[in-house]
Amino acid sequence: MSGHSKWASIKHKKAATDAKRGKIFNKHARLIEVAARQGGPDMSINIRLRAAIQAARDANMPNDKIDKAVKKGSGQIEGVTYEEMVYEAYGPVGVALIIDCLTDNRNRTVGEIRHTLLKRDGHLGDTGSVAWNFTQKGIIAIPVEGNDEDRIMEIVLDAGAEDISIEGDIFEITTDPKVFIAVRDAISTAGIAVAHAEITRIPGTTVKLDKSDAGKVLRLIEALEENDDVQHVSANFDIPDDVLEALKNEE
């Protein structure tokens, strides 16, 4: 998982400066709308909404767009009803994928996902074909530079985190999804910057990728995430640090 989470951190940094910010904001808006529709607009009792709004703020989404998404979801202004869909698939060299979507047209979404997979040496799998290998966890990445490991460990473990490890130039903190927000809040309260934070699926077994295969898999994931309906892609690959650094330098 380390390769995937580190790649996610790299993408998070790029998102603040590249031309895809509008697309990213739209994805966050959908998450906020669904959370507000399901649990109401009060963040003090709707933990899912709070997490969605925090993720949007981490992506520098403007407050007016966040407020508008909350109002759409809570019915204060007219909005679209989105359906949550999860697709299981395989990518190059047998990498397992779970694709989380929010869509207003499931036929369109599955057709587009199938097309993207087939173009890049992947294919859809049956329900349950890869989900058995994944466990839902919260992942929070903090830069190693400028942060003391003992202090980080004390803060996050006191807040309920399960584990902390060093993956290259980041501290990777793993939490149960139920305490993800509490740990994220404890880090923010301590004045520590977060590089990346999300609730994702952690694989039990991984496929180690060389540069050629890693490039193919990452290009497939990026193509899937270009789809407006795709919220997140989890995968069971691992990329050695030297390979990931080489790929990053090519961006």
Image (tube, rainbow, N blue to C red):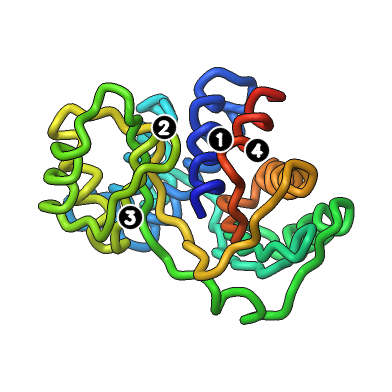
Does residue 6 appear in this view? yes
Give the labeled residue for mark 4. 243
Q: Quadrant of residue 88?
A: bottom right
Residue to which mark 3 is pinned: 174
Quick one: 23 or 8, which is closer to the camera? 8
Q: Earlier in the sequence, mark 3 or mark 2?
A: 2
Q: Nearer the viewer, mark 1 or mark 3?
A: 3
| Residue labelled with disc 1 | 24
| Vertical placement of residue 107 versus 126, above or below | above
Mark 3, Cα crowd under 10 Å, few <14 / some 14-19 / many 20+, is many
Disc 1 versus disc 2: nearer the observer: 2
Q: CA distance from mark 4 to mark 1?
A: 27 Å
For the residues labelled 3 and 2, the Cα–Cα distance comes to 16 Å
- Of callouts 1 and 2, which one flags the residue occurring earlier in the amino acid sequence? 1
Image position, residue 158 (x, y; %): 10, 52
Q: Earlier in the sequence, mark 1 or mark 3?
A: 1
**In-image side of 99 versus 40 (left or right):** right
Q: Is residue 53 visible?
A: no
Marks 1 and 3, Cα distance to the nearest angstrom?
Answer: 24 Å
Amino acid marked by disc 2 = Asp
Disc nearer the start of the sequence (4/2): 2
Identify the residue at the far right of this view.
Answer: 119
Q: CA distance from mark 1 to mark 2?
A: 25 Å
Label 3 and label 4: CA atoms lie apart by 24 Å
- In this picture, residue 238 sits left or right of residue 63: right
Q: CA distance from mark 4 to mark 2?
A: 15 Å
Q: Given the image, on which type of amino acid does mark 1 rest?
A: Ile
